[in-house]
Image (spheres, rainbow, N blue to C red):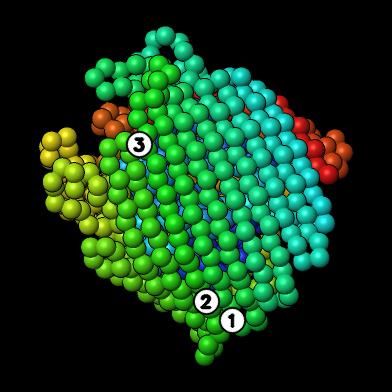
Amino acid sequence: MKKTLIAAALVAAGQPLLSAADTLEQVTVTASRTETPKREVGVSVSVLTQADIQRMGYDSLLDVIRTLPGISVSNSGGAGKVSSVFIRGESNYRTLVLLDGVNIADPSAPQVGAQFQHLQVADIERIEVLRGPQGMMYGAGAGGVINIISRKTSEPLRAQLDLEAGRYGTQKTAASLGGSSDGWNYDLSISDFSTDGFNAMEADDSGERDGYDNVSGSARLGYQFNEAFSLEGQLQRTETETGYDNCGFLFFVNDCMDRYNQSSARVSGKYQQATSGHELSVASTDIEREAFAFGEPSYGFDGAISELNYIGKSALGGGQLLWGGEYEQQEFTSNFSEQDIDSLGIFAEWRSDIADKVFYTLGYRRDSLETDDHNSWRASVAYPVLLGDNQQLKYRASYGTGYRAPSPYEVGLNLSEGVEAVGPETSRGYELGLEYQLARLLQLEITYFDQEITDAIVYDYTLGSWGAYRQDDGDSYSEGVELSLNGSLGERFGWYFNGTWLDAVDTTGAQRSLVPQRVCNLGFSYSLLADKLTLNGNWRRAEDILDSSGEALDDYSKLDLNLAYRLTEKLRLTLRGENILDEDYREVGGYYTAGAAVYAGVQLTL
């Protein structure tokens, strides 16, 4: 039975913003796949800019996005180890992750989701997180959409070099180069992150460190033929090696290594006029994974995603019509089997307003899978109210549905075991939100959400010879409240707070594992010496967490600080402390987390 959530939040007023990232004037491109002022958006979307990311000082995308409302993370043993991102309690395989328009999910995994532990923030310009079921616009599941946008250089020439080193033998080198001239624009980047790590698993009493190496690179080239037409091509590559514990089949060992290589490419053409536009793109992602025990190969998986996308938009009858189509093929190959799945989706959304005061959207999508078809839709409304010269209030509401098609692995395993095939999961969710902005002095946002999943795909070890997948009976639920505040005290001190009070249960009514039911972040930014020196901090608190075995994990708090000094206009020094109170905590039962650590760095910009 669905539980009832009772959440209360005490709201304290403050003064200007840490940044302009979430102002009502901010433009988002993720909510409706086209640029839309946030004041007209009726769904929950958070935006992090490059300035926000730089202030935090983190290397990993996981650490950056977990500072946002509605998001929690579980990590099993440090950098590069298996990690899950939960948006409103939903696992990352129910969330679509885009990197410069490319779906970077791993189709070689049992459930197709992004490998978040391998995503670094070097050269990221913007992150947008869309929360809740987004099946209509993206064909995504119940979690939402994370849209990662790399830097696109607009000046004639820009070059940057970042160096950092610290505890656990951690070293990072990142370099980027970009420019724009005579219609051409380009960006190149490469990063090398390595750490000796620490012993990941409590059961391993050898004291052996489980290290991690990550080399990532990207290249982008674009040409603007005229004001309307442009072409762009991009390549991305990530190669990692991760040490971990507890691998094997008949017996288990702790000398384990996972090699993961991901390549992606995208070519797109865009034709944009004042009242209409079209974009056509072709993209692919290829995954190669190989596991080793005692230095010897034990098994391997390959995966691939191929996509063809078209999006069009046109002003029509006082509103805007956006439409498009997507063809996608996912492939999975192992030492023992291979499987592929094709899907075709078409969608349309109508955006308009009533007297330029109430903004609404209505959208519909139809996806044709190999076994059946699926319909999704979304409706949203936003009502911004000007309360004087410098105050705004916005009421918003939305309802949407989503689905998750079975992965190639889930389909292939059931075929090999002679078990009934599984169909897609379906989801629905609604939310009610209130946003308030006092000039640049204070922002408040509070959202109530309620969503459910039907026909969830679950593993059942009693099926077939070695286990298989089936559709779960009943519905699983997630409901809660998200609260976000930011402001400042004077010209030099800014602050933010966000909290999530969550009630996430499975079909039996039991609390979902690894998902904190209460999470909050409290952060600040303080500048002095004519803004040359800045100190930034984030304190995170997570409570009421169950391990996958159903055992309770301890509540925990973690404090991180980042100090930056601008020596010259081109040279910047950093000193970052993570878990500076040396909290001993677990995000996954039986796996250690990092202790107190300090990292020093230098950034040179030309």
Q: Earlier in the sequence, mark 3 or mark 2?
A: 2
Q: Looking at the image, do the residues carrying marks 2 and 1 touch, with CB atoms under 8 Å apart?
A: yes
Query: Please, what is the three-letter code of the amino acid marked with disc 2?
Result: Gly
The image shows residue 193 at horizontal and vertical percentages of 61, 31
Amino acid residing under circle 3: Leu
Q: Position of residue 141 (x, y in %)?
A: 36, 57
Q: Which residue is mark 2?
A: 312
Looking at the image, the residue that sits furthest to the right is 568
Disc 2: CA contacts within 10 A as few (<14), some (14-19) or many (>=20): some
Q: Secondary structure at mark 2?
A: strand
User: For the residue marked with disc 1, what is the amino acid?
Assistant: Ser
Q: Is residue 303 left or right of residue 337?
A: right
| Label 3 SS | loop
| Picture quadrant where residue 469 is located | top left
Residue 486 visible in image:
no
Q: Position of residue 486 (x, y in %)?
A: 60, 51
Residue at (52, 76) in percent of width and height? 312
Residue tagged 1: 276
Element on which disc 1 rests: strand
Q: Residue at x 48, y 67 (%)?
A: 309
Tell me the tag on residue 514.
3
Q: Are marks 1 and 3 in contact (CB under 8 Å)?
A: no
The disc, 1 or 3, on the residue closer to the chain's N-terminal end is 1
